[in-house]
């Protein structure tokens, strides 16, 4: 019998005024009792609209009914059938726009907390089963070799599926640590790095080889990989090239791209006192942008000791692309929102250090191509904010290195790799997916592309 309570079981969280000074995870996760109560809210619909909302088609009602029965490990194994990174997805997926958006319970009241239940199952498995429970796959010595470029969500997901199919997979990662955006981009308080490390270790146990500090396009080209015996190459190099606003003063001291700022904190451990990573610990910080990355940068700046952190965004709060939960958490933590404001100039002193930023007030006009109302400047409404640090978070695009060193690989005007079906490129034997194809998007969409690519590579190799 379904539990008809209208609202989700709340997720326990650290108090805002405590957590904005530490790097521990904000959300503490469900207890077993919470999880069972929440799972009984699922109606077990016949047509399962939640599943079609999930980019990797997790069998959601099946795993939730196992949670309701108290079979948490069974539930975890059910998720793992289609999702190789449940502990990560349970934390960073925008469930409210995907599975939970389609949940029938959401018509009257709140949808079932699918993401929280997924995280609970993954955390239960991690706490009760050691790494030795990972099935090592017996890959024959003469198995076909596949190269994967990039160890972010698309690359890891593709590598895992190919290893299960019996391929010899080598992942080439440009940085000194695997995980891609999961390692360098998402802060510790949203996604503890120990979780990413566990997922990477599980892949290695399955027989996937990960080569770090290996920049494809510099160390070795895609052509050279093909010539050296790899039967196919999957490009999952992400979208790590930051965009800027091209306003005066943008190259002053104290201006960062959100990418650099977050990489210094997450990958280079600037959040830890025992690391001497150079980073500016500003007292008055502005983050330009309204996406999840902007929220992450603002919340990190607060934790580094800033007195005032502003989110400066040219549209209204309703138009912000960030997850509602991220905006809510940022506000709770004391981040100041200056919406309908657009920076026009960054002002520096005679030594080139940022002292303030000039902005202009905006108002919203008719919707533009993105469907959002277009911001229009209000004449004569300029104002200054006193600052010592500015973080620019207005989007990223794919690094041009691979397209510049690979003949016959078509890209569009945004630098994204062109595919015929989401993963097959214009170059035979070369597949691509995730942010390298779509531009910056979500972890789960990249994982879905990784799974599709693994299936396409399997078909391609067998057809040869």
Image (cartoon, rainbow, N blue to C red):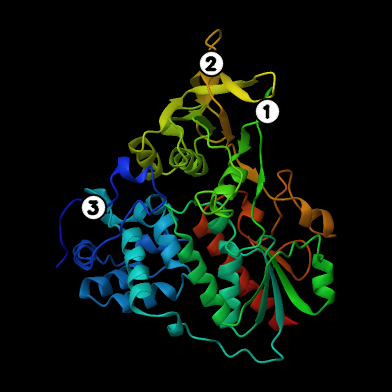
Question: Label 2, on which residue?
Answer: 384
Q: Are marks 2 and 1 in contact (CB under 8 Å)?
A: no
Residue plotted at (35% across, 68% down): 123
Pointer 3 local density, CA inside 10 Å: few below 14, some 14–19, many at least 20: few
Residue located beneath label 1 in the image: 252
Pinpoint residue 63: horizontal percent, then vertical percent: 32, 72
Q: Disc 3 or 2, which lies upstream in sequence?
A: 3
Front one among 187 and 354? 354
Viewer-side residue, 261 vs 419 = 261
Residue count near mark 1 (Cα–Cα under 10 Å), binned few <14, some 14–19, many ≥20: some
Q: Position of residue 303 (x, y in %)?
A: 44, 42
Q: Residue at x 59, y 36 (%)?
A: 394
Point out residue 371 in the picture as x, y percentages from the top left corner.
51, 34
Percent of width and height locating residue 356: 57, 20
Is any part of residue 258 visible from this angle? yes
Spatial separation of the CA atoms under disc 2 and disc 1: 16 Å
Q: Earlier in the sequence, mark 1 or mark 3?
A: 3
Q: CA distance from mark 1 to mark 3?
A: 44 Å
**Residue at disc 1, secondary structure:** loop
Location of mark 3 (residue): 10
Spatial CA distance of label 3 from label 2 is 40 Å
**Residue sitting at 68 percent across and 67 percent down?**
212
């Amino acid at each position: 019998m379904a539990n008809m309570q209208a609202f989700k079981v709340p997720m326990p969280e650290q108090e805002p005024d405590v957590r904005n000074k530490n790097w521990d995870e904000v959300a503490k996760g469900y207890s077993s009792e919470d999880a069972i109560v929440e799972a009984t809210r699922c109606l077990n619909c016949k047509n399962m609209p939640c599943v079609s909302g999930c980019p990797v088609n997790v069998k959601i009602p099946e795993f939730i009914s196992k949670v309701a029965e108290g079979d948490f490990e069974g539930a975890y194994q059910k998720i793992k059938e289609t999702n190789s990174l449940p502990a990560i997805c349970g934390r960073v997926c925008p469930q409210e726009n995907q599975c939970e958006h389609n949940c029938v319970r959401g018509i009257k009241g709140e949808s079932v907390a699918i993401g929280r239940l997924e995280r609970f199952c993954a955390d239960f498995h991690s706490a009760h089963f050691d790494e030795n429970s990972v099935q090592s796959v017996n890959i024959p010595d003469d198995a076909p070799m596949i190269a994967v470029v990039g160890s972010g969500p698309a690359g890891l997901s593709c590598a895992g599926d190919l290893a299960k199919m019996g391929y010899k997979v080598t992942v080439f990662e440009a940085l000194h640590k695997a995980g891609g955006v999961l390692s360098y981009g998402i802060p510790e308080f949203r996604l503890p790095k120990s979780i990413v490390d566990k997922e990477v270790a599980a892949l290695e146990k399955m027989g996937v080889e990960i080569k770090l500090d290996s920049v494809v396009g510099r160390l070795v080209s895609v052509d050279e990989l093909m010539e050296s015996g790899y039967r196919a190459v999957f490009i999952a190099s992400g979208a790590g090239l930051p965009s800027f606003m091209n306003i005066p003063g943008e190259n002053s001291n104290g201006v960062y791209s959100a990418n650099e700022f977050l990489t210094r904190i997450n990958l280079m451990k600037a959040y830890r006192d025992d690391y001497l990573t150079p980073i500016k610990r500003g007292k008055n910080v502005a983050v330009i942008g309204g996406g999840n990355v902007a929220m992450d940068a603002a919340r990190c700046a607060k934790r580094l000791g800033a007195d005032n952190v502003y989110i400066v965004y040219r549209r209204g709060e309703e138009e912000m692309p960030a997850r509602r939960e991220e905006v809510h958490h940022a506000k709770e933590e004391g981040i100041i929102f200056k919406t309908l404001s657009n920076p026009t100039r960054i002002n520096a002193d005679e030594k080139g250090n940022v002292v303030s930023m000039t902005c202009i007030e905006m108002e919203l006009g008719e919707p533009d191509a993105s469907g959002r109302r277009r911001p229009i400047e209000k004449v004569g409404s300029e104002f200054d904010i006193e600052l010592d640090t500015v973080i620019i978070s207005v989007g990223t695009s794919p690094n041009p290195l691979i397209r510049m060193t690979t003949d016959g690989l078509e890209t569009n005007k945004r630098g994204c790799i062109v595919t015929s079906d989401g993963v097959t490129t214009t170059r035979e034997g070369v597949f691509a997916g995730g942010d390298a194809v779509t531009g910056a998007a979500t972890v789960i969409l990249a994982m879905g592309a990784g799974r599709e690519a693994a299936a396409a590579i399997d078909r391609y190799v067998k057809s040869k």
